[in-house]
Amino acid sequence: MRLTKQTNYAVRMLMYCAANDGHLSRIPEIARAYGVSELFLFKILQPLNKAGLVETVRGRNGGVRLGKPAADITLFDVVRVTEDSFAMAECFEDDGEVECPLVDSCGLNSALRKALNAFFAVLSEYSIDDLVKARPQINFLLGITGERPYRKSEIVAPAA
C-alpha cells in the first residue's frame, strides 16, 4: 500500500504547524520549507480544515494553525481525511464489478482486510506530536524562526 503525495504533505503541514506552536504558519513558508507549490498546499488545506485538524485565520497577518492539540491528531486521522480509497485488491471495491467467483468466500479478502485494520491500528498509535518530538531540531530544519504569536481574536472557525 502506498499513501498519496497529498497525505504525505498533509502530515508535513501538520508537523510544521505543531513545530510552530503558538504562532500562525503561513502557506508560503510551509511551501518553502518543503519545496512544494503553494497551490498544492492550499488544496490539501481545505479537507484538513473541514475535518477540524487545522484552523485558518484570514487577513493580512493570517495563517493556519492546528485545530486541536498535536497530541490529539493521529496519523490515522490524517489518512482518513486525505485518502480516497483503501482498496488493496479489486474485491475491496464497492462498485459490484468484481469478476472473481470466490469474492464472497475468499481467504485473500479476509487476510487483506485484517492487514488493513492492523495498518490503521498502528497509524492510530502515532500522533503529530510524536513525530515532532522525535526531531528535536525540527524548527531549525524547517527554517522556523518564531514570529509573532497569534491572538485568540484572530481565529476564524473552520469552514462548514
Image (tube, helix red, strand yellow):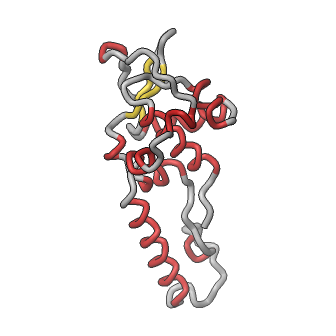
Total residue callouts: 0
Q: Residue 60's spot in the image, x, y percent?
A: 51, 9
Q: Residue at x 36, y 14 (%)?
A: 154
**From the image, which quarter does the C terminus lie in?**
top left
Q: Nearer the viewer, residue 104 or 10?
A: 10
Q: Quadrant of residue 155?
A: top left
Q: Residue at x 49, y 83 (%)?
A: 111
Relative to 110, say whether 94 is above or below: above
Instruction: Report whether residue 106 is seen.
Output: yes
Relative to 90, say whether 43 is above or below: above
**From the image, which quarter does the N terminus lie in?**
bottom right
Q: Residue 32's spot in the image, x, y percent?
A: 65, 29
Q: Which residue lies most toward the top here?
A: 60
Left/right placement of residue 1 relative to residue 11 reads right
Relative to 86, say whether 79 is above or below: above
Left/right placement of residue 153 relative to residue 86 reads left
Q: Nearer the viewer, residue 125 or 140?
A: 140
Q: Nearer the viewer, residue 136 or 124?
A: 136
Left/right placement of residue 129 relative to residue 39 reads left
Relative to 127, say whether 122 is above or below: below
